[in-house]
Amino acid sequence: MKTTVHKVDAWGKVGAFLYRFRYTTIALLVLLAVTLGIFAPKLPGVLGGDGFQTKGDYQTTKGILEKDFKQSQDTLLLVFQKEQGVSQQRFTERIDEIVKKIQKEETYDSFHHPIENKAMLQDDIAYATILFSGKTSKERKEKTLAFAKEIQKESNGEVKVSPTGYPIINDEINTRTQNDLKVAEMIGLPIAFLVLVLSFGSLFASILPILNGALSVISTMGILYFVGEQKELSIFVLNVAPMIGLALSIDFALLFVNRFREELVHRSVKEAIMITYQTAGRAIIFSGLCVFVGLSGLFFFKIDYIQSVAISGMIVVVMSILFSLTMLPALLTLMGKRLIGKNQNVHRTAPMWRKFAQFVMKYPIVMTVAVLTFIVICLLPLRSADLQFPGVEALPKKSEARIAYERYEDAFNKIIKTHADVTLVVETKGNVTEKENLQSLQKVVQKLKKDKDVYEVKSLYEQLGNMSAEQLAAMLQSPNRAQVEPVLDAYVKDNKTTIGIILDTKPRTEKAKQWVRDFKENYKTEGITYYVGGMTTLQQELEDEIKSKVVVGMSVIFTSTFLILLLAFRSLLIPIKAIVMNVLSLSATIGIILWLFEGGHFGLEQSSVLFVLPIFIFGLVFGLSMDYEVFLISRIYELYGETRDNDYATLEGLVSTSRIITSAALIMIVVTGAFAFTDILPVKQMGIGVALAIFLDATIIRLILVPSLMKMFGEWNWWLPFTKKKRKEMH
């Protein structure tokens, strides 16, 4: 076979430099990986909750409720469930025994239980709430979890005690997320290794991509530990960083090792690493940049979860590029000719790829129409999409914390399952108990009751038998003040009071969110400041944050990707095609995900799709799927530069990269798709979404749409305005 002559450029000189200093390079990078790896196991300890929060009224109101009213999401909920055959009297007696044990604790700020409040007790179920004291949230959390573990031991044949609520649910998500990572690795890595062995036919060559991925992920998790010390990161970075890092690092290594082995057949080790660096290395840089800028677009969304994904993703991309273009080439130069052994046919291609490529290019219009028709069908579920933010349903149905919480809701808080809720903090200029402020507050309550969209109002007036402001003011000045003080203690703190509002609509509806948006404008009152909280407010603020930033975020991703591909391929049309094809395939992915989860197909639990999932997939997979576009077009661009024959370059480029890109896509699908077998719903949706997007990109986009469009546009693929040389070549 005739060897193509490559002029050595700056990229090739970097390869020569790494060849010369390969031992030093390996030593330094091993030292870096080991140093960062020491801190990687500590990462879970510095991570926060799910990250579904943003700055706004919800966070402000939450702070006020915690500080002034001791109403905190850190409150532990204890659910007491009567076992079969136990009498009601014995059930109550057993609860009383447990309550007395708890009351011996001196570390809680508040404790409400069914012995003092019969509304917290029913025939076979009761509940208590405990908020532990602590100087910091971390200290309070540690006390809560330790207590929850101990209190479960009070369960016996008469009463089952189940701790639940936000701290328990959040801790279980944390624990299951770490376990899910192990499960995904146990499923994904062995299969990825098998694919590598089948692709390379060499054990040595197959180990390198796995090693590359492991070093990149471990180093990233070490860096994230230090980031987590300064900024709260979502627990889901434990899944996102390995998901991206392993898939991307193995992909990069697969491309680099494959090209190096091809060059080794006809060149020395030094020449092979130089040529590999200026071909595959160049493609890795541009591919990595596409992934990096895709993730950078997520920074515009001021939501902790999305920013955590962006931070962890961008760091792991940088580390993947670093190890792929330093440690990997250095190791390859040490292994040298042993990577190919006696097998000189390392760049074999199956005849079926050539036949398929020829068939597609023979009927480009038919192929394009077929793909677009398929995509339009996949887009149909978007019309009725019901995107939501996860609650307790993020946990699997078998979770004890979820079971206990749902039983509590069904028994005591069913209205919250059927109606949207809003928590209002009303701040007055003076003490709430001043007569004028009581009158203003009563007007607000009366107006709320008359609101056609309000189902129920819970304020101090309802608790006092709808007493008027004047009557309450008079009682506060009389000897009978003690009769109303328990209610005032619960509802009033100096110049603030709380109002619970139940809306006449289901939770998470657009009607509920719009009511919250309009509230302050509709309820303007002289001398009163409102703070609006509750789950409806949180969902509204998160949704509005995404909707307000989506155009800017996507514009940054599209523009940056366009400029990178323009620089890489000196073409106007190729970047535009790549972006349009990615948008179509990713939109189709979202449509299929909606169909799968909202319909509960293929054994999946029927559930709403995570509201941020489309943003996550566009930000992450837009860059990841560009890998294959860059790998493929890089080879076509290389061949076109040699022959100036678009059809030949497209055909041979597709055929020569088909095996390796298919292997790379399969590995990425396996690594990310392994998260489909996890327990946490958001992680499951992320894993399936990424795997599905990669599958569509590697099949209908790369195998059909890319060659069809390359054939249809011909020499126009390589046109760049204001470039005389290009224009002359075209004519």
Image (spheres, grey):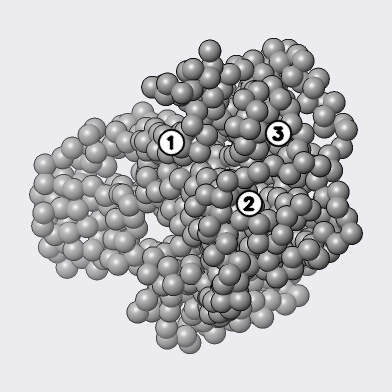
Q: Are marks 2 and 1 in contact (CB under 8 Å)?
A: no
Disc sitting over residue 563 in the figure = 1
Secondary structure at badge 2 equals helix
Q: Is residue 690 left or right of residue 119?
A: right
Between 399 and 710, the one lying in front of the other is 710
Which picture quadrant has residue 408? bottom right
Mark 3, secondary structure of its residue: helix
Asked if one can make out residue 230 in the rendered structure from this viewpoint, the answer is yes
**Identity, as a three-letter code, of the amino acid under mark 3:** Gly
Q: Tell me: residue 345, above or below residue 108.
A: above
Is 420 drawn above or below residue 226 in the view shown? above
Q: Nearer the viewer, mark 2 or mark 1?
A: 2
- Separation of residues labelled 2 and 3 (CA atoms): 17 Å
Residue in the picture at 15% in, 40% down: 525
Q: Nearer the viewer, mark 3 or mark 1?
A: 3
Residue at point 62% right, 45% down? 6
307 and 659: which is toward the camera:
659
| x and y percentages locating residue 253 in the rendered image | 67, 56
Does residue 206 appear left or right of residue 552 in this picture?
A: right
Looking at marks 3 and 1 on the same chain, the residue that comes earlier in the sequence is marked by: 1
Answer few, some or many: residues within 10 Å of disc 3's Cα (few below 14, many 20 plus, some between 14 and 19). many
**Dots 3, 1 in contact, CB < 8 A:** no
Amino acid, disc 2: Ile
Q: Residue under circle 2?
A: 275
Q: Measured from the top left, where is residue 334 in percent x and y?
A: 70, 70
The residue that label 3 is drawn on is: 653
Mark before the other along the chain sequence, 2 or 3: 2
Task: Say which amino acid is labelled 1.
Answer: Leu
Instruction: Please name the residue shown 43% across and 79% down the image.
Output: 139
